[in-house]
């Protein structure tokens, strides 16, 4: 067995956009039992954090209204 | 299993001795992996592969049962990958030779991003979090981010989603 390195390499970048959604990019698994999502998205995704999107868990721009 | 597994890059998991590769878009849900070795392959856990849940021999035996190239494996010691018995059907030599050159990193566990019903987003693993002009390095830990818009500790969840009438639909 290998020893765990003291510092691990970050696998993803999460950014909380001011007045906007959460941007996520990197090696992730997104899961949402309610909507039957279990996937490793390519590229970046934007998740709603205002509570108003009509396309949850994703942001649909409703935060601007 | 009901979950849909969509395309993505392959994932890899190691216990220091072997590396197991997961290619989600190839999975046909034959379910040998979790029926044989739930200690290692547990679709309801995040991350779903725990390479320390069983011995290397048991993991190899189970991965060889996968009928597609969704699960493959190789020795971390490259010497051992030269001459592999064809009974090891899911060794990368036979299924995904392009992975032979792949150098094993010490850790590449994907970050788990879980959408909690009527609740926050729970992000766990090793990642960087940017908020309020700050950058926080999170190492093998978790944060809980508000999805309802009603937290008074933004961007983090403070439990207010229970009081606000957050409709998670
Ligand atoms: S953050 Fe964009 S719709 Fe909620
Ligand atoms: S999701 Fe918990 S306070 Fe908003």
Image (tube, grey):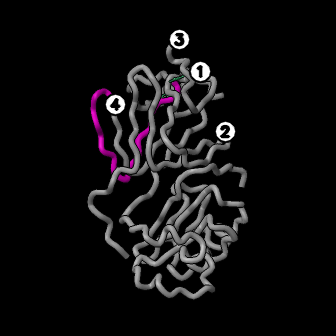
- The image quadrant that residue B145 belongs to is top left
Dot in front, 4 or 1: 4
Residue denoted by label 2:
A35
Q: For mark 4, give the secondary structure.
A: strand
Magenta-colored segment: predominant secondary structure: strand
A42 relative to B93, above or below: above
Residue at image location 58% in from the left, 60% down from the top: B23
Same chain? Circles 3 and 4: no
Measuring from the top left, give residue B48's x and y in whole percent.
Answer: 55, 59
Residue denoted by label 3:
A65
Residue at image location 65% in from the left, 60% down from the top: B26
> Neighbour class for label 3 at 10 Å: few (<14), some, many (≥20)?
few
Start-end of magenta stretch: B132-148
Give the letter of the chain under mark 3: A
Same chain? Circles 3 and 1: no
Q: Are marks 2 and 3 in contact (CB under 8 Å)?
A: no
Measuring from the top left, give residue B17's x and y in whole percent.
Answer: 42, 77
Dot in front, 2 or 1: 2
What's the CA distance linking mark 4 and mark 2? 27 Å
Residue denoted by label 1:
B165
What's the CA distance linking mark 2 and mark 3? 25 Å
Residue denoted by label 4:
B131
B97 relative to B81, above or below: above
Give the letter of the chain under mark 1: B
């Amino acid at each position: 067995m290998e020893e765990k390195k003291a510092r691990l390499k970050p696998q993803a970048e999460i950014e909380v956009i001011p007045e906007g959604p959460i941007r996520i990019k990197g090696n992730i698994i997104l899961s949402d039992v309610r909507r039957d999502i279990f996937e490793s998205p390519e590229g970046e995704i934007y998740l709603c954090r205002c509570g108003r999107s009509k396309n949850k868990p994703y942001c649909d721009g409703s935060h601007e209204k | 299993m009901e979950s849909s597994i969509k395309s993505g890059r392959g994932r890899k998991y190691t216990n220091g001795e072997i590396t197991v590769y997961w290619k989600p878009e190839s999975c046909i849900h034959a379910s040998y992996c979790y029926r044989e070795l739930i200690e290692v392959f547990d679709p309801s856990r995040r991350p779903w592969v725990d390479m320390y849940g069983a011995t290397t021999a048991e993991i190899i035996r189970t991965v060889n049962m996968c009928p597609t190239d969704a699960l493959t494996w190789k020795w971390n010691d490259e010497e051992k990958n030269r001459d592999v018995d064809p009974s090891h059907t899911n060794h990368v030599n036979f299924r995904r030779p392009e992975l032979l050159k792949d150098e094993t990193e010490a850790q590449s566990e994907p970050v788990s991003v879980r959408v909690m019903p009527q609740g926050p987003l729970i992000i766990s693993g090793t990642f960087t979090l940017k908020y309020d002009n700050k950058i926080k390095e999170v190492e093998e830990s978790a944060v809980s981010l508000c999805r309802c818009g009603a937290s008074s500790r933004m961007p983090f969840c403070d439990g207010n989603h229970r009081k606000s009438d957050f409709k998670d639909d």
